[in-house]
Image (tube, rainbow, N blue to C red):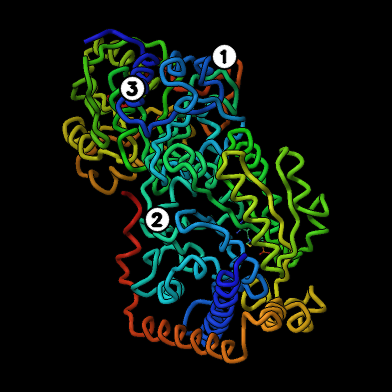
Amino acid sequence: MALITYSKAINQALEEELRRDQDVILYGQDVAEWGGIFKVTDGLFEKFGPDRVFNSPISENVMVGAGVGAAMMGLRPVVELQFADFIFTAGDEVFFKAGMWRFMHGGAFKIPLVVRCPSGGSGFGPEHSACPEAFVMHAPGLLCAVPSTPEDAKGLLKTAIRMDNPVMYFEHKLLYAMRGEVPDGDYTTPFGKAVVRRQGDAVTIVAWQEMLRRSLAAADRLSKDGIEVEIVDPRTLNPFDRETIIESVKKTGACLVVEEAYRTLGVGAEIGAMLAEHALPYLDKPFKRLAIPDVPLPTSPQLVDAVVPSVDAIYKAVKDLVG
Amino acid sequence: MDNTKLLNVYKTSVLARRFEARVIQMAMAGEMPPSLHAGAGQEVCQTAAIAALNPEDYILYGHRGIAYMIARGTSLSAILADMAGKVGGTNNGKGGVMHVVDVPHGILGESGTLGGGFVMSVGVGMALKRKMPGRVVVYFFGDGTSNRGTFHESLNWATVQRLPCIYFCENNGFAVSVRTSASTSVQNIADRAAGYGIPGVVVDGTDPVAVYEVMEKAVERARAGQGPTLIEAKVTRLLGHYLADQQTYRPDAATILTTKDPLPKFQESLLRVGILTNALVKQIEDDAQRQIDEAVATVNAAPLLAPEAALQDLYA
Ligand SMILES: Cc1ncc(C[n+]2csc(CCOP(=O)(O)OP(=O)(O)O)c2C)c(N)n1
């Protein structure tokens, strides 16, 4: 085990996969000599050269669309968008080309594409701070990873690169500097397997990335009040592990989803609907969500704090639930 | 272009024209969805351009007709089955005639959103350069499609990375009902090549030899690693945008059928130089008819796709 940052974990996954498979290429704006806007790709250009690691023009449509075209011809492109929000700049290419090209051509192609999307980290304003994974979860054909720890960041990215389907990989900007233990050697983390980050019996909290970190902090405080929450980290949103959540809800009888995204039709809405369909008998409290109240993310920190779920808000929501 | 190739272009154009006419007839009779955008008038151009490629090269095409696939060697019955939603097609009911795909014949598919082929071509070009050097990819698109932003992003990218991509615009003067002159800032789409520092060539799309020759140059340039060429062929769309299009925006819609059809002109020129004879003309027509009848019979006998197909093919 080594203690490394989330950012370094991503960098290691990229380096190991670039080394393992000649078909892996990595491109995006500033990713070469400069190491990327968040320095995640530092040193890779020097190790693999301009054929494998290169800067792209500011052309998001081609960045993703060419990734699909290259993937269907046998390369394994990893594309770095500078901000996750730009999946909408490349909307056709993400949702139609990546998500549907194989389907609409009757399965003639495999699309082993990974699009890395630095998300969240409010403060960058409405077009540079979003966590748009719910849009991806809604779209057929796109797998979706939301790693919350350095270990998962590395393991899920390695899995994503080896997969034959397009993966939207959301890396949270506030987690880049987070440190954590990462196994030595080659390992991968499976898609579609949630993990219980903390055990408890009072309430099931479903959260990932920065909201997971805040939920864990809230859980420590709740514990001092004698309330033990169970926290489930889904790790991937497509495929989505319902069973782990349902199993947890069987134990706790209550569910709170905390997400750093718009409330309406967010991931929480899907989880609520899923529980209503499959687990209603186990819920003895109303299903609850904490999310951004359907406004774009503002820029000023005090305004951001007013809309993004905080440790306090999570603490209070659980207190209200167990009331 | 040698005589054999030229004669092949003629044969393929005739086959595409007659096949399309049969498809239109069947669609009008309600025997299949009327989803085709007829390519009549543009087949000679499409076929001549494809004649300049090797079998190992690739194409991404637009929605205008089915000559592309026929020229590459896709079977008529597969194309027809795609249109009819029958077993035996290329895309298992997912894409109809819009997404005919045939990888062994180098047909990589179509983007339903116009101009999606630009971005795809760049990726194909990146893969060819690294994994299959010497091969090229051609993207066929309309004049209206050249106004998509993807045109700019892709031509810039393909040029700066010297990718083996060829951009082939079929300018038929219309995007549905809108005249090119009303929507487009330049007189020739090929003029836009100057913005990327690549060759931009205008060619008469009714002249197969001329089309072949400009394509040959573009292919040579791409194979040599010198990057893309933008070709613009001036063509005539003989029929409506889609099958039920009344073309009220086009006062000469009836007369162009006789005055602007490149196929009789092509035939005459081949007769004049003796590549064709009257007997051969008849044989080619009969042969086309036979192939079409066979394809129709095959597809008529084929079962409809099972509804379960709707749930297949999404993930690998
Ligand atoms: C992005 C997008 N916009 C609009 C359409 C609808 N549409 C399909 S074909 C067409 C006209 C295309 O004109 P052009 O590129 O000149 O080709 P032509 O039909 O003349 O062959 C339009 C507007 C579409 N499929 N995709």
Q: Ligand 1: give its quadrant.
A: bottom right
Query: B165 or A102, which is in the foreground?
Result: B165
Can you identify the residue that label 2 sits on? A103
**Residue B32 x, y percent position in the rendering:** 47, 80
- Picture quadrant of residue A228: top left
Q: How crowded is mark 2: few (under 14 residues within 10 Å), some or many (20 or more)?
A: many
Query: A249 or B149, which is in the foreground?
Result: B149
Q: What residue type is labelled 1?
A: Pro
Q: Distance between the residues labelled 3 and 2?
A: 29 Å
The numbered mark, 2 or 1, whose residue comes first in the sequence reads: 2
**Residue B64 x, y percent position in the rendering:** 61, 67
Same chain, labels 3 and 2: yes
Q: How far apart are marks 2 and 1 (CA)?
A: 43 Å
Query: A91 or A296, which is in the foreground?
Result: A91
Tell me the tag on residue B67: none
Can you identify the residue that label 3 sits on? A13
Which residue: 22% across, 25% down?
A196
Can you identify the residue that label 1 sits on? A301
Instruction: Identify the element where label 1 is drawn.
Output: helix
Q: Identify the chain of the residue marked 1, using the numbered disc in the image.
A: A
Residue B113 visible here: yes
Residue A269 visible here: no
Q: Which amino acid does label 3 sit on?
A: Ala
Q: Distance between the residues labelled 1 and 3?
A: 33 Å
Q: Which amino acid does label 2 sit on?
A: Phe
Numbered disc in front, either 2 or 1? 2
**Residue B67 x, y percent position in the rendering:** 55, 70
The numbered mark, 3 or 2, whose residue comes first in the sequence reads: 3
Same chain, labels 2 and 1: yes
